Image (cartoon, rainbow, N blue to C red):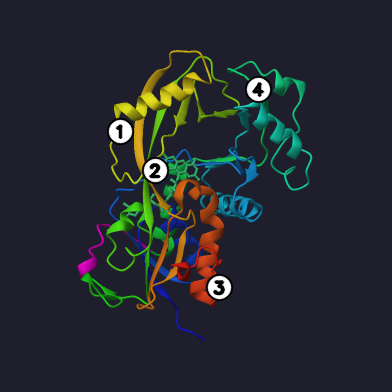
Amino acid sequence: MSSKKHVLIIGAGLSGLSVAIQLIRKGANVTVVDNLENHSSRVAAAMINPLVFRRMTKGWRVDEFIPALKHFYQSIEAETGAKFFSFIPIRRLFSSEHEAELWKKKQNDDRFTTYMEPTTPEDQNYDKAINLFGSGRLKNTYFVDAKVFLASCKKIVKEKGQLIQAAFVYSELNETSYQGIDYTDILFCEGYLGINNPWFSYLPLDPTKGEVLTIRSEKLPEDESLNRKCFNLPLGNKLFKVGSTIDWGNPTTHATKEGREEILKKLSLLIDEKVEVVDQQAGVRPGSKDRRPFIGTHPKHSNYHIFNGLGSKGFMLAPLLSEEFAGYLIDGEEVHPETALNRF
Ligand SMILES: Cc1cc2nc3c(=O)[nH]c(=O)nc-3n(C[C@H](O)[C@H](O)[C@H](O)COP(=O)(O)OP(=O)(O)OC[C@H]3O[C@@H](n4cnc5c(N)ncnc54)[C@H](O)[C@@H]3O)c2cc1C
């Protein structure tokens, strides 16, 4: 039997913490180091939407991701007593006749009935927002309160492993020894800051800035999330998160006037109201050029691994992919071929 693994994980965002939990569950010892910058997970709306509206298709591997994420988030809730995972109804306001037709064609197709409600006359005539071509309601859509989720994971890591609040300094890593402690494996989960990683910068990580607003609205419904050009997420007390911008190749983390104007313009296509902006945040999604994550081991350094590139749907992908990574590292299983590093 192999000796117990002690994995040093760099990054305590969604990626690093999800993997840490899965490794702990497989009996590994983990130490997570994080500099508290957190440029994506903290800002994310963290909504889980299984459909890609542009082509009205299912997202990549959603039939596998949805059951895995329900199990993962609910198991952490049960372990910590925290509440951060909820169902949120999403209503798509169709953006064209063509889109409405596509929905109607697919709503009774067995491959889509898990995610689409058949449209009703009420959906067609929905009047709580500007409705040009009718609307459709999704099924299996969720929301993760990212702050509470991250705090819950950190609680588990502190109890069952170690969490160090500090910057990880690459030059202090000597083989698998860091600051006087020997580890069996080093795992990089740095989000977009992975562009600075001396071993994995050969991977085409694509930092994609995103901005979100928190607004107060008298008109938006508080019992569902509306989607067309932008999304809104009801937070209670007439507050809503609205977003988001997509700025490929931009690794800056400050909120901008342009970002705010862009979101408000998109929102004006959904409701006719001058809303109050209460807050604005910016983060950088760790995208990848081929829109698939990077999961695996460095070709020359067999104890250096990466779990990154979750892009704009991390909260949907992380639960299953982190489980697959733990199976890879501890039990020698294969990672999913579309996430494997040998594609580069
Ligand atoms: C505006 C916006 C909206 C989004 N909305 C959604 C959504 O609705 N649904 C969804 O599923 N996803 C959404 N996302 C995407 C989601 O946020 C990401 O997929 C996910 O959070 C990526 O997590 P990560 O852990 O890889 O990166 P990060 O959250 O950036 O975490 C990386 C961590 O590593 C740390 N780190 C890096 N380098 C070092 C170092 N040298 N030393 C110490 N620590 C280090 C950082 O401080 C950070 O804490 C959104 C993103 C943005 C920006």
Is residue 275 found left or right of 67 in the rendered image?
A: left
**Do callouts 1 and 2 mark residues in contact (Cβ within 8 Å)?**
no
Q: Callout 2: helix, strand or loop?
A: loop
Point out the stretch of residues depicted in magenta.
162-171
Residue marked by disc 4: 133
Of labels 3 and 2, earlier in sequence is: 2
**Do callouts 3 and 4 mark residues in contact (Cβ within 8 Å)?**
no
Q: On screen, 305 above or below 133?
A: below
Observer-side mark, 4 or 1, equals: 4
Q: CA distance from mark 4 to mark 2?
A: 35 Å
Q: Callout 3: helix, strand or loop?
A: loop
Q: Callout 1: helix, strand or loop?
A: loop
Q: CA distance from mark 3 to mark 1?
A: 40 Å
Q: Indicate the position of residue 1 as horizontal and vertical percent values.
A: 52, 86
Residue marked by disc 1: 255
Q: Is mark 3 within 8 Å of ligand 1?
A: no
Of labels 3 and 1, earlier in sequence is: 1
Q: Callout 4: helix, strand or loop?
A: loop
Q: Amino acid at mark 4?
A: Phe
Magenta span contains residue 50? no
Residue marked by disc 3: 334
Is residue 2 found left or right of 130 in the rendered image?
A: left
Q: Amino acid at mark 3?
A: Glu
Q: Is mark 2 within 8 Å of ligand 1?
A: yes
Q: On screen, 44 above or below 16?
A: above
State the mark number for residue 42.
2
Asked whether residue 205 is in view, the answer is: yes
Image quadrant in which the C terminus is located: bottom left
Observer-side mark, 4 or 2, equals: 4
